[in-house]
Image (tube, rainbow, N blue to C red):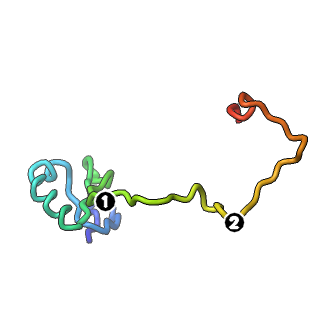
Amino acid sequence: MTTCQFCNTFIPMEAMAVGELKTRFSEVLEKVKQGQEVGILYGRTKKPVAKIVPYQEEKKGKRKIGILDGKVTIKFNDDFEMTTEELCSL
C-alpha cells in the first residue's frame, strides 16, 4: 500500500513512476503474474493514471441480457405500431 508523497492520495497497491516502470518492466510483469496489481504514476505530481492487473479469462456460459431479465414483463397494446426506422432513431 502506498501514499503519493506529493498529494497524499492513497494508492492501495504498489505504484511506480513511468521511468521506474520502464526500468523494472520484467519484474513488474512477474508480480502481476503472481496476482498483484501495480499502479502507474505520471508527471511531476506523480498522479495515478493507470494500473496493470492480472489477466482473467472471460467466463463462458449463458449471460443474462439485463438485471431485470426474468423479473419484468413488457406488453404492447394491440394497436401499437412502430417502423424499424422509428425504433432505430430512439
Tell me where residue 88 appears, x and y as whole percent. 68, 32
SS at circle 2: loop
Residue position for label 2: 71
Q: In which quarter of the image is the N terminus?
A: bottom left
Q: Which amino acid does label 1 sit on?
A: Gln
Tell me where residue 58 appears, x and y as whole percent. 36, 57
Q: Quadrant of the C terminus?
A: top right
Q: Residues within 10 Å of mark 2 (few under 14, many from 20)?
A: few
Between the C-alphas of marks 2 and 1, the distance is 30 Å
Q: Which one is nearer the viewer's eye here, 71 or 10?
A: 71
Tell me where residue 32 appears, x and y as whole percent. 20, 61
Residue drawn at point x = 20 percent, y = 57 percent: 16
Residue position for label 1: 56
Decide which of tag 2 and tag 1 comes sooner along the chain: 1
Residue drawn at point x = 27 percent, y = 67 percent: 13
Name the image quarter holding residue 38. bottom left
Q: Residues within 10 Å of mark 1 (few under 14, many from 20)?
A: few
SS at circle 1: loop
Number of marks in picture: 2
Looking at the image, the residue that sits furthest to the bottom is 1
Looking at the image, the residue that sits furthest to the right is 79
Question: Taking 81 as reference, is 72 left or right?
Answer: left
Tell me where residue 89 appears, x and y as whole percent. 70, 31
Q: Which one is nearer the viewer's eye here, 62 or 22?
A: 62
Residue drawn at point x = 18 percent, y = 62 percent: 33
Q: Which amino acid does label 2 sit on?
A: Lys
Tell me, yes or no, whether the two marked residues, 2 and 1, touch with CB atoms within 8 Å: no
